[in-house]
Structures are given as structure tokens and as C-alpha cells.
Image (tube, rainbow, N blue to C red):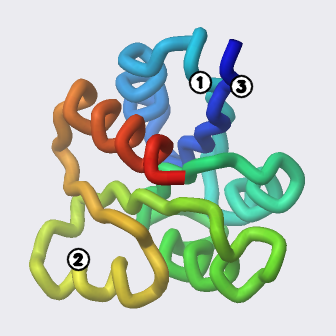
Amino acid sequence: MEKKKKILIADDDTHVHEMITVVLSPDEFEIMHAYDGQEAVEHVCHELPDIVVLDIMMPKKDGRDVCQELRADPRTKDVKILMLSAKDQQFDRIVGLEVGADDYETKPFSPVLLARKIKRMCAKE
């Protein structure tokens, strides 16, 4: 049996956690949750997930700051980051990718399409 991929959902909206969790198979993924930026950094440093689904606008630490912090740390620099944000202007996407995100998805999103994107990102490892 193949090892489960670890996914950290970092978003202050519990509804987002629920939507993503419902579409990811518990047989394939171990899902962790963080509800603010500081908690996200701590989870990534301790658990080293395969992918972080990272909201930009969160309490305690902005998602862009989290992304930069993870990229600057040799232990976490290779963790894949999928930014998920209501900020949908082209400028916001560019900034998200420039601070180190591997991909960028806007809210509202299709949970099924997001799950496919997460699976593709896992397959590229």
C-alpha cells in the first residue's frame, strides 16, 4: 500500500476545510488543519506535509508571509504550496507566485477541480 500524502489546509474559514476534506479520499490523504498563519508555519515545520493549501488573508500571519517563511527555511523550502484566495486580480496571482507558491487558485472554487489539482501536484513529486 502506498504511503498517504499529507495535506495541510491553512485557512481561517472552516467551510473551506470541510469542502476540501469531503473531496479528498481518506485512503489517499492524511489531512491536517490550521486556522491562522502562525499555526500553519508550526504544522509545516513539525509535520512536513506534501502540500499546503494556503489562504492569503488569515489572522496572525498573512499567507504570503507564511509562504516566504517556508521557502526561506531549508527544512520546508520544497513543500508544495497551493495558494487559495479570494484575491483574483492578475496582480494578486503574480505576487502569490513570486513569493513562492507553486500554484494559485481563486475563491470561490470547485472542490472537485481543486482536489484534481492537489492530486496532480502530489503526482509530480
Give the residue drawn at x 66%, y 36%. 6
Classify mark 2: residues with Cα within 10 Å, few (<14), some (14-19) or many (20+). Answer: some
**Residue type at numbered disc 2:** Arg
Image spot of residue 21 (x, y percent): 47, 22
Q: Residue at x 29, y 63 (%)?
A: 104
**Label total for image:** 3
| Label whose residue precedes the other's in the sequence (1 or 3) | 3
The amino acid on which the numbered mark 3 sits, given as a three-letter code, is Lys
Say left or right for 20 vs 45.
left
Q: Looking at the picture, how far across and down is residue 75, in whole percent?
A: 82, 72
Position of 39 relative to 101 (above/below):
above
Distance Cα–Cα, label 1 vs label 2: 27 Å
Horizontal arrangement in the rendering, residue 74 relative to residue 109 (left or right): right
Q: CA distance from mark 2 to mark 3?
A: 32 Å
Q: Quadrant of the N terminus?
A: top right
Q: Which residue is mark 3?
A: 3
**Residue 93 bears which disc, if any?**
2
Q: Which mark is residue 29?
A: 1
Labels 1, 3: front one: 3
Packing grade of label 1 (10 A; few <14, some 14-19, many >=20) is: some
Helix, strand or loop at disc 1? strand
Up-down relation of residue 99 to residue 18 (above or below): below
Going from the N terminus, do you reach mark 2 or mark 3 first? Answer: 3
Between 122 and 65, the one nearer to me in the picture:
122
- Please name the amino acid that badge 1 sits on: Phe
Residue 89: horizontal and vertical position, in percent? 11, 76
Image x and y of residue 93, in percent: 23, 76
Label 2 element class: helix
